[in-house]
Amino acid sequence: MLTLLLLMLACRTKTGPVDDTLDSGVDGGAADSGAIDNDSGLDGGADGGSDGGSDGAADTGADTGCPPLPWYADLDGDGFGNPDDVSWACTPPLDTVATDGDCDDRDATIHPGAAEICDDGVDQDCSGRADNTCPVIEGVSALKVGELLDAGEAALARPGWGPGAANALGDFDGDGIVDLATGDPAFDGYHGRVLVVPGPVEGVRYTDDTSLYAVTSVVDDAVQLGTRLAAAPDMDGDGSDELLVVSPKVDGADGTYNVGEIDLFHGPIDGNRSSAEADAVLLGDADDGSGAWGWRLLTADLNGDGQAELAVGSILAGGDGSPGVVYIFGAGLAGAVSKDDAVRLTGSGASAGAGSALASGDFDGDGVGDLAVSEPYYDAPGNVCVFNGPVDADRGMAEADTTLVGVQDSEGLGDDLAVGDMDGDGYADLAAGAPGYTGSEGSDYGAVRVHPGGRSGLDAVPLLTVLGESGVLGDGQGGMALLDLDLDGRDDLFISSPSAYTEAAFKGQIDIIYGGGTGTVHESESDRLIQADRNLGELGRSAAFARQGGSVVAVMGAPDWQYDGNEGAVLLLEIPGG
């Protein structure tokens, strides 16, 4: 039966218009003319409008001069036909319909307009993308990985300071499963701590859970350890990722107030750690200003030697005018690390904020990583300065190989950055947030522009622009990433907007825009939307994203969320790919 069906399908497709009316007898008239006649008998003379054979039906198609029409095979009977299986006739042949567009003619539940079943990886409505009409993930019950809640410290868990103030995802214990690190800088009178949750993170976990690992400071002062975090992909080749922890309120050895400290912990992290056990310590100095050392952290191979360097943004450094400086430290960091050995990239002007965001990718395809540095406060619109690799010498932002300039005063271009290949051409693309952009009519709430890479580096003309509507897009308080969720070879854009305002509350949300798009789209046109069904307290603060098998794991801070008498939460969500 299967063989017969396949043969029937193979014979159905025609190469051009045909008369698909089947004569079972011999026509009594002259031979037909015009379009190809699909009669099974032989014409014996003039038709005269009727068959001389046994079917007794009037001949149609080219025999009567009517134009043939396309008819599409509808084997599953859902009213939509297979566009690749077409017959031409005046009247519909058996099991055909006039409307095509069916992407699976074996399943009647799959056709244009069909209800999409969320998170099953199947394209029910034949839109070309699975799950594209599944926009809202409602409430806690839909979270696939779990939640980590703050227990008993409600007075300290205020926005930006309690658990979820900073988050990082990485394989910190080397078991191949994504782990969570979350900063809690207000813990214990602002001494701070970082909680490391071994993956898989499932169910409800409280911060007093003894199975969690804590990173704490040995400094008996309110150093706010865990204010900023970063996961560093395996720098020493032992199979586990490293963790970078910022304590912005550490004083200098000479007593200088709040110079800040960065602690590097090599994995595997499979137990409690203190700052005294850090594998490397990078201390700020008076030039870095109060609390600005380690504003952004990035690990990437920036000189082509096959090893990852560490780039540190210090947005108030640089001497007169505090333009900001990015310090690049070589591989093999250990012990007390001196800033004197670092490469320095200095900001363009007073209060430019150089180093507010950092990103690296091979934008020009030469095989060496390039570095993008933002100056969101420079010259009103802001800049993103791109240095082609190798980046191994001191330079000023004015010496950048490419400079992207904001289009509107105070838009803050580069407040957040992300790198990936959104158009699938093999060159890295750069997504740059502009949270202050309001548009020509003042109705937009920020923007994210994706600039494509190419042989000449980044193009100043965006490939894609996303405009905010309900919340501020591109704000560095949220987070962005480019990762291939739908597994089509093009990275997809994740934008976290913790200030998104819906239903009279700042609920926050994460928008997902699939790769391959061009032009301008609004936030409401996002392919996917992760949004709470109630106020979770700026959901999406300090968001981070990581690939785990065929899915993307997202961590979202919700520092205001009230739950069972506790305040503050970190929510994790596994977003199925495909």
Image (spheres, rainbow, N blue to C red):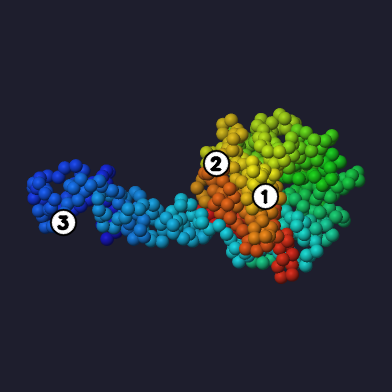
Identify whether 121 is placed above or below 308.
below
Question: Based on the displayed image, in which of its 4 quarters is residue 139 positioned?
Answer: bottom right
* Residue density around tag 2, few if under 14, some if 14–19, many if 20 or more, within 10 Å: few
What residue did someone put label 1 on? 472
Q: Does any portion of residue 198 appear in the rendered image?
A: no
- Of residues 389 and 28, the one drawn nearer to the viewer in this rendering: 28
Residue 481's spot in the image, x, y percent?
A: 62, 48
Residue drawn at the location 67% of the way across and 43% of the way down: 437
Residue 333's spot in the image, x, y percent?
A: 75, 43
Quarter of the picture containing the N terminus is bottom left
Residue drawn at the location 14% of the way across and 45% of the way down: 32
- Give the SS element for disc 2: strand
- Give the SS element for disc 1: loop
Who comes first in sequence, dot 2 or dot 3?
3
What residue did someone put label 3 on? 57
Residue drawn at the location 67% of the way across and 60% of the way down: 504
What residue did someone put label 2 on? 519
Which kind of residue does numbered mark 2 sit on? Answer: Gly
Q: In this view, does 103 lie to the left or right of 298?
A: left
Q: Is residue 138 left or right of residue 160?
A: left
- Of residues 53 and 343, the one drawn nearer to the viewer in this rendering: 53
